[in-house]
Image (cartoon, rainbow, N blue to C red):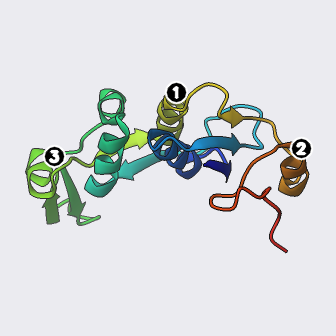
Amino acid sequence: MKALIIGGGIAGLTAAIAMRQRNIEVLVLEQAARPTEIGAGIQIAANGSKVLRALGIEQAVANCAVIPEAMENRDMLTGNLVWRIPLGREAAALWGAPLYNIHRADLIELLAKAVPDGCVEFGVRSPVSSRMKKRSASGPRTGAPMRPIS
């Protein structure tokens, strides 16, 4: 089985890793010339951490991410604590995985390293339909060439 993934961001790279683990041949097309540092810090909740674990990259994420101990809301004028949600070990024990804070570029770099060589093409600006004509990708069940949906 073969799959074409449009976009080499977090979702596209994650999908590629998961498909490769299931022996699905993938090609990721990304219009950027290379992975870039666009974006900011993101939070990965426990359910996302479990996905990273299943993909085999949670430890790599843990090595460059931060696990916050709590989320707090304070009164802007007085600084008094209004509410506090424990995170860290307490939340990891409750949900089965930690919440990570990581820069988007760092996460994309880790995901890109987990995708086998030759599975991602950067700098692709041609329409998908013209790319499909150039490659002999097969559909999932019929073996027929993939065609753009009109």
Observer-side mark, 1 or 3, equals 1
Query: What is the tally of numbered marks visible in this picture?
Result: 3
Q: What residue is disc 3 on?
A: 88
Which mark, by number, is residue 134? 2
Of the two numbered discs 2 and 1 on the same chain, state the one appearing first in sequence: 1
Of the two numbered discs 3 and 2 on the same chain, state the one appearing first in sequence: 3
Q: Nearer the viewer, residue 74 or 54?
A: 54
Q: Describe residue 91's horizontal placement relative to residue 20 as left or right.
A: left
Q: Describe residue 121's horizontal placement relative to residue 61 as left or right.
A: right
25 versus 60 height, above or below? below
**Residue at image point 27% right, 65% down:** 77
Q: What residue is disc 1 on?
A: 113
Image marks 1 and 3: residues in contact by CB distance under 8 Å: no
Which amino acid type corresponds to the residue marked 3 in the rendered image?
A: Gly
Position in image of residue 67 (x %, y %):
24, 41
**Residue at image point 15% right, 52% down:** 96
Farthest residue to the front: give it.
Answer: 142
